């Protein structure tokens, strides 16, 4: 038994499902670190308050989602609100890749940093 | 049984350092029960956390009574852990199911990922065919780690043949329950990425200074 040929085009799936995620939800990567820039204000939506409390220290989008027990897509929308209000800042991942996403590789200096960290575990 | 009860890491959130400013990610992909969560748990600074991603798809032609105005949504759960690498850098590890219907989750996870580990159980190698196809198609670099469940001994060559795995892609053995072994899996991946990236950088330097 062996893996079948690769001529079946996986892009078919994109067409059937009407494409991938929209750009506005891609502003926050799963591992973008969110930092609160202000205290919660009176009358704020409770999820916004919770996010600001969590993000007193840098906190990844995915950790916020896990803590709030909300889907990541919902958390991205809440974060978008807070960002627009200037209540948070976002520290986006830097892999040193020439192009974001796609097939471009992380920069060697970033990878060396990762290796040092892993070997020291 | 889950080993969460014997996990001595604190249940409350452990915040990152104030100086943390770069979140990186590696994806562990593989079939049901192949050891993804176990591997993440073995190396993570925190107890693995669970969350979900929802994908709204055009439901045209899909026979789904819950479809509203031609849209249907799919939810997929995934877990993750994290490793603080230094004062500024933190590595997130995501465990993602390898089945075809979760393709949309991988596209999200793979975007911007350093690379992936395909975890395989030699008793069920076919479970990983689709994941390997997707990674190749997406251009995400990966290695294959063979988690030992005590199945029949296969040679590396047999596994490579069954996976149609090119010779330059590392294939290693691991025990996801062991921290040292799981660490070695991650190091093998990052060394592989480093070799690929070095080759690319020197090729680019050749172009600019022939
Ligand atoms: N013998 C052996 N058992 C393992 C190994 N890794 C994991 N297991 C066991 O296999 C079972 C499944 O492991 P999980 O880590 O939950 O697998 P998973 O890939 O996260 O599973 P799903 O998320 O359900 O797809 C658990 O009971 C583990 O203790 C291994 O290297 N060797
Ligand atoms: Mg799991």
Image (cartoon, coloured by chain):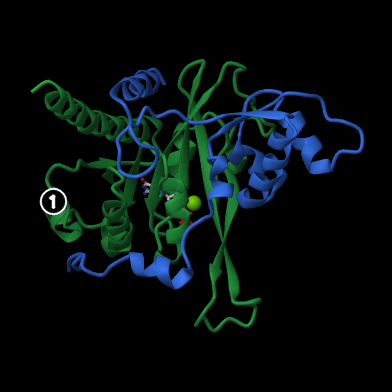
Chain colours: A blue, B green
Residue A32 shows up from this direction: yes
> The C terminus of chain A is located in which quarter?
top left
State the image coordinates of residue B9 (x, y, percent, origin top left).
60, 30
State the image coordinates of residue B67 (x, y, percent, origin top left).
62, 77
Residue placed furthest toward the right: A42
Q: Residue at x 17, y 54 (%)?
A: B159
Q: Secondary structure at mark 1?
A: loop
Horizontal placement of B85 versus B209: left or right?
right
From the Cβ of disc 1, is ligand 1 less than 8 Å away? no
State the image coordinates of residue B186 (x, y, percent, origin top left).
34, 33
In depth, the one of B110 and B57 nearer the eye is B57
State whether residue A92 is above or below residue A80. above
Q: Residue at x 41, y 40 (%)?
A: B112
Horizontal placement of A73 versus B150: left or right?
right
The total number of labels drawn is 1
In depth, the one of B99 and B41 nearer the eye is B99
> The N terminus of chain A is located in which quarter?
bottom left
In depth, the one of A117 and B124 nearer the eye is A117
Give the quadrant of residue B56.
bottom right
Horizontal placement of B86 versus B148: left or right?
right
Q: Label 1 is found on which chain of the structure? A: B
State the image coordinates of residue B70 (x, y, percent, origin top left).
59, 77
Horizontal placement of B155 versus B115: left or right?
left
Instruction: Please tell me how crowded label 1 is: few (under 14), some (14-19), or many (20+) other residues with Cα within 10 Å.
Output: few
Q: Residue at x 20, y 57 (%)?
A: B163
State whether residue B101 is above or below residue A117. below
Residue A67 shows up from this direction: no
The residue that label 1 is drawn on is: B155
Give the quadrant of residue B128.
bottom left
Give the quadrant of residue A47.
top right
């Amino acid at each position: 038994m062996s893996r079948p040929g690769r001529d079946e085009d996986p892009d078919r799936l994109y067409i059937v499902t009407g494409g991938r995620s929209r750009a506005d939800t891609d502003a926050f990567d799963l591992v973008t670190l969110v930092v609160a820039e202000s205290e919660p204000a009176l009358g704020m939506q409770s999820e916004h308050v919770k996010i600001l409390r969590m993000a007193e220290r840098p906190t990844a989008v995915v950790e916020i989602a896990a803590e709030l027990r909300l889907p990541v897509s919902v958390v991205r929308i809440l974060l978008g609100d807070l960002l627009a209000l200037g209540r948070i800042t976002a520290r986006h991942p830097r892999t040193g890749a020439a192009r974001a996403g796609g097939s471009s590789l992380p920069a060697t200096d970033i990878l060396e940093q990762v290796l040092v960290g892993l070997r020291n575990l | 049984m889950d080993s969460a009860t014997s996990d001595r890491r604190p249940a409350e959130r452990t915040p990152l350092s104030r100086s943390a400013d770069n979140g990186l990610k590696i994806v562990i992909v593989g079939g049901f029960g192949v050891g993804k969560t176990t591997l993440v748990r073995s190396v993570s600074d925190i107890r693995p956390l669970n969350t979900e991603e929802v994908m709204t798809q055009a439901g045209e032609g899909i026979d789904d009574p819950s479809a509203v105005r031609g849209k249907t949504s799919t939810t997929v759960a995934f877990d993750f852990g994290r490793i603080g690498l230094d004062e500024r850098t933190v590595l997130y590890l995501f465990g993602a199911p390898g089945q075809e219907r979760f393709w949309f989750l991988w596209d999200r996870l793979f975007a911007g990922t350093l690379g992936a580990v395909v975890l395989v159980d030699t008793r069920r190698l076919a479970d990983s065919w689709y994941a390997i196809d997707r990674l190749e198609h997406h251009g995400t670099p990966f290695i294959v780690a063979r988690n030992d469940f005590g199945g029949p001994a296969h040679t590396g060559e047999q596994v490579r043949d069954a996976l149609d795995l090119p010779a330059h892609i590392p294939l290693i053995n691991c025990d996801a329950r062991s921290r040292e072994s799981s660490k070695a899996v991650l190091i093998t991946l990052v060394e592989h990425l480093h070799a690929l990236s070095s080759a690319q950088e020197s090729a680019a330097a050749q172009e600019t200074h022939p």
